[in-house]
Image: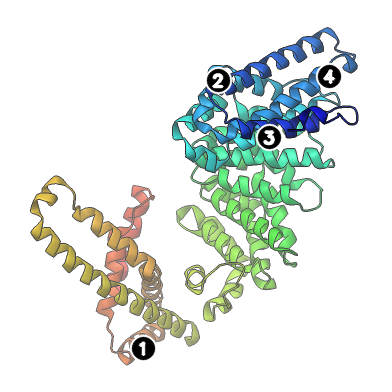
Amino acid sequence: KNVGRLEPFGPSSRPITWILYLDLSFAEPLDESAVKRMILTFEKRSYKNQELRIKFPDNPEKFMESELDLNDIIQEMHVIATIPDLYHLLVELNAVQSLLGLLGHENTDILRPHVCIAVVDLLQELTDIDTLHESEEGAQVLIDALVEGQVVALLVQNLDRLDESSKEEADGVHNTLAIIENMTEFRPEICADAAQQGLLQWLLKRLKAKMPFDANKLYCSEILAILLQNNDGTRELLGELDGTDVLLQQLSVFKRHDPSTAEEQEMMENLFDALCSCLMISSNRERFLKGEGLQLMNLMLREKKMSRCSALRVLDHAMIGPEGTDNCHKFVDILGLRTIFPLFMKSPKKMKKSGISEKEHEGLRGWGIVDRLMELYFKYLDAVRVADKKIEGEKHVASYVSLLSQDMVRRGEILDDDMEEEFYLRRLDAGLFLLQLLCYIIAEICNTNIPQVRQRVMQILNMRGSSVKILRHILKEYSESIGDGKSAEFRENEQKRILELLETL
């Protein structure tokens, strides 16, 4: 009520203007007409600013006022983020294209970064993931327009202009990464294009920059891990950009020193996740081998620091399957077995912060070794039996329901195949996969030319009232399940090998 009595202060009254605008906007709920007027004002100010910049390119004083006016209306447009149902107006009235035009502007004078940061702040709020989910239709329209306008490429160009020694510009970097996270969470398929538009290269450059650890470096590690999920093209691109070496260099800091804060530990785990993802393709396993990744992981295991469990996970990704053969041979050459056997004999205590469970560790890691194998075999055999008993009870209930609802079965509402798959996945989660691997190892060592080993295995089976028939059954089930995600040749070779081992048992 005292609007008329307020006086401007300093060189501009804009802070008060913005506060007053917020008060008035809450007093009068924003409707479609108000949003249209706001967007029209933005377009007029953007056009005027561009016109003055062209007319007076070497005289910023001539367009300073228009620049501040433009910044004001961009700030006012934040209120649109409260009504995602009207996002379509931003697209229909060309506001998205105009905002992206400001973001990609070539001028880098003292005023322009402030406008670019204002645009980034606005886009970050418009793409807030919770806001996007409030209106699927409005969100789809906005994201489509941003993708079509090559928003990631423009954001990356703008990132190269920002100086993080300035808090405002460092916040601009953080909000830029937030836009990318929001978009990729809402539409995961964007990840592949985002990586190709220069983002992956910028992230790697920022990670290896000689700068103190901060929130932006943590965010970069998080975005990198997201981009590499479920995308072989991005994983290959990372390898081509020497990203495997960058990850190893960044992780080498933690071979003898633990992260100093929880945030730095989170970054370390993000980097390990990214490394595991990129090792899903064979070309990066070769780069990992040449980059002495095995030696680094082996050293981490020996140093017993916080990185230990994640290093074991990386080794698992590097050496599994036929593509990991070269890494397996190299690991033996560098005496890696001498490092992992003590871990196999006794699992390290679960690290509270790492979140690695004992079961996960055992899935990765004289007589003592045979006895330990058999100890783990019975441990997971008991766990799977408990799960099987529970599943059998559920199957009886499901069968009873099926008999009462044959019409539902015919309509496909009860799917036996889907239920069986779900039950099998639950058995794997309960420990069946580890049990299968243990049986494979036991069968292999029984097939060596050391009869005492085989005798010891049989002795322990007899002592526990068990028999080799159970082991054979588990191994046979494993051979029948091989093939998911593997080549036909790999499956055939593995099945042939398992059949040969079954014969020896």
Of residues 466 and 14, the one nearer the viewer is 14
Q: Amino acid at mark 4?
A: Glu
Mark with earlier residue (4, 3):
3
Image depth: mark 3 or mark 1 in front: 3
Which residue lies at the image location 66% right of the left edge and 40% below the top edge? 177
Q: Position of residue 148 (x, y in %)?
A: 54, 23
Locate the N terminus by quadrant. Answer: top right
Of residues 11 and 148, the one nearer the viewer is 11
The residue at which mark 1 appears reads as 460
The residue at which mark 4 appears reads as 65
Residue 188 at least partly seen: no
Q: Amino acid at mark 1?
A: Ile
Image depth: mark 4 or mark 2 in front: 2
Name the image quarter holding residue 270: bottom right
Q: Which mark is residue 74?
A: none
Q: What whole-number distance in Å separates the C-alpha atoms at marks 4 and 2?
A: 27 Å
Q: What whole-number distance in Å separates the C-alpha atoms at marks 1 and 4?
A: 86 Å
Label 2 sits on a secondary structure element that is: helix
Q: What whole-number distance in Å separates the C-alpha atoms at marks 2 and 3?
A: 18 Å
Residue 308 at least partly seen: yes
The residue at which mark 2 appears reads as 33
Name the image quarter holding residue 354: bottom right
Mark with earlier residue (4, 2):
2
Mark with earlier residue (1, 4):
4
Which residue lies at the image location 74% right of the left edge and 67% below the top edge? 256
Mark with earlier residue (1, 2):
2
The residue at which mark 3 appears reads as 23
At label 3, counting other C-alpha atoms closer than 10 Å, the crowd grade (few under 14, some 14-19, many 20 or more) is few
Mark with earlier residue (2, 3):
3
Label 3 sits on a secondary structure element that is: helix
Q: Amino acid at mark 3?
A: Asp
